[in-house]
Amino acid sequence: MHEFRITPVSAPLAKAQRDKITAFWESENAQVTNPEKRLEEVAYCAHTEDGKLIALCSYHLGRGIYNELPLYFMRVFVAKDYRQTLLAFNLLAHLAESLADEAKGNLIAKGVGVAAILETDIVKNRGTIECCRTFQFPINKRPLTFVLTGYTSTGSPEYCHFFERVVNSSKPHNSGEKDSSDSLNHSAFQRVSMGQNPSLDASIASFLAKERQLELESVQAYLQQKIIYVRYQDEVIVTLGLLAPKLLPEINAIFFGLNLVAASQEGHKINSGASSFIEDIFSDMNVRHSGKLGEAVGIYNLHSGKTSLPLINSRTRFHFQGLDNEGRELRLRYFDGAKLVV
């Protein structure tokens, strides 16, 4: 068992520290571009019990590949003999925890989360990559979850961990995805297969035609292509959840796109219960699709504009992925155990 200790590095580095790190890079044949700049970014080092440097972690402020958010990009370099251990993750855990503490309650925090890029060679050797990874070391107050958010130009996957309760925008927006307690009285949830109950099929088609002001015949054909969930209040349809598979180029993977259709009342959409409905839909779909390599890896939904939701919604756990070409906000959540072949 490898024994080591992780310690923070205080800037500016003393000459002896700089020389020790530089010698470490050279002994491990590390390809470091701009060593002087990297030395200024070192935050944590790992040593053996006898003081031998075996790993270090650095970071810099940058922008997410697709979400374009200000993130602290973390880099870890580990000695060859220690690469089969969890040392790299342990270093990342230390750095992520300290940056999260720094951002907590800081209204002018520069970064809204941390990001790490998995080197292309490592990805190729593994054959598959996880879409979401959670780990917790003794240093962490709570588990850290990193989600796949995009790829570099060379195909290396980018993973992000967002600081809790960071809001994406101060602009209010009726997103239909609330954090408040928004349950419906006497509500019910149901997954529907068209063709098994003609009366229910007709009710669903009439509801959608009315709410979207569409021709009934076109609605019936449209519904045949969807996975359908229904939410009732006192046995009356109040919301439809319609899903269909689609390739998301940002992740290069198939997701189920979720479209919510809520009942109108005096010209206003009734969004009460939206978060609970999304939770129920995800839970059911997750049971059916989690851990199945080669299938859809999660669910996404689009908002008409930038929302005021936290980067990770505390209720639905959908995270901010970015804005599409039409300025719509893309949010998604991965199924448990989702992986991609690379």
Image (cartoon, helix red, strand yellow):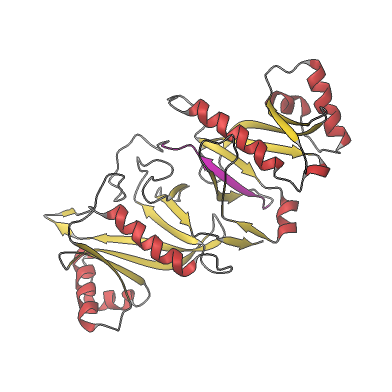
Decide which of 120, 98 is in the foreground and name it. Answer: 98
Quadrant the C terminus occupies: bottom right
Question: In the image as oriented, which residue stretches furthest toward the right?
Answer: 27
Residue 79 appears in view = yes
Spot occupied by residue 105 in the image (x, y as percentages of width and height)? 43, 26
Residue 98, above or below 194? above
Residue 242, above or below 78? below
Q: Is residue 135 left or right of residue 181?
A: right
Quadrant the N terminus occupies: top right
Spot occupied by residue 76 in the image (x, y as percentages of width and height)? 71, 38
Spot occupied by residue 223 in the image (x, y as percentages of width and height)? 32, 74
Q: Within the image, what quadrant is residue 279 found in?
A: bottom left
Q: Is residue 170 left or right of residue 333?
A: left
Query: Which residue shows up at 75% across the image and 34% down it?
Result: 4
Q: Within the image, what quadrant is residue 187 found in?
A: bottom left
Query: Which residue shows up at 43% across the image and 42% down it?
Result: 311
Query: Which residue shows up at 52% across the image and 43% down it?
Result: 143
Question: In the image as oriented, which residue stretches furthest toward the left?
Answer: 266
- Please tell me whether residue 161 belongs to the stretch shown in magenta: yes
Count of numbered circles on the image: 0
Q: Which segment is the magenta one?
A: 155-165
- Please tell me whether residue 227 belongs to the stretch shown in magenta: no
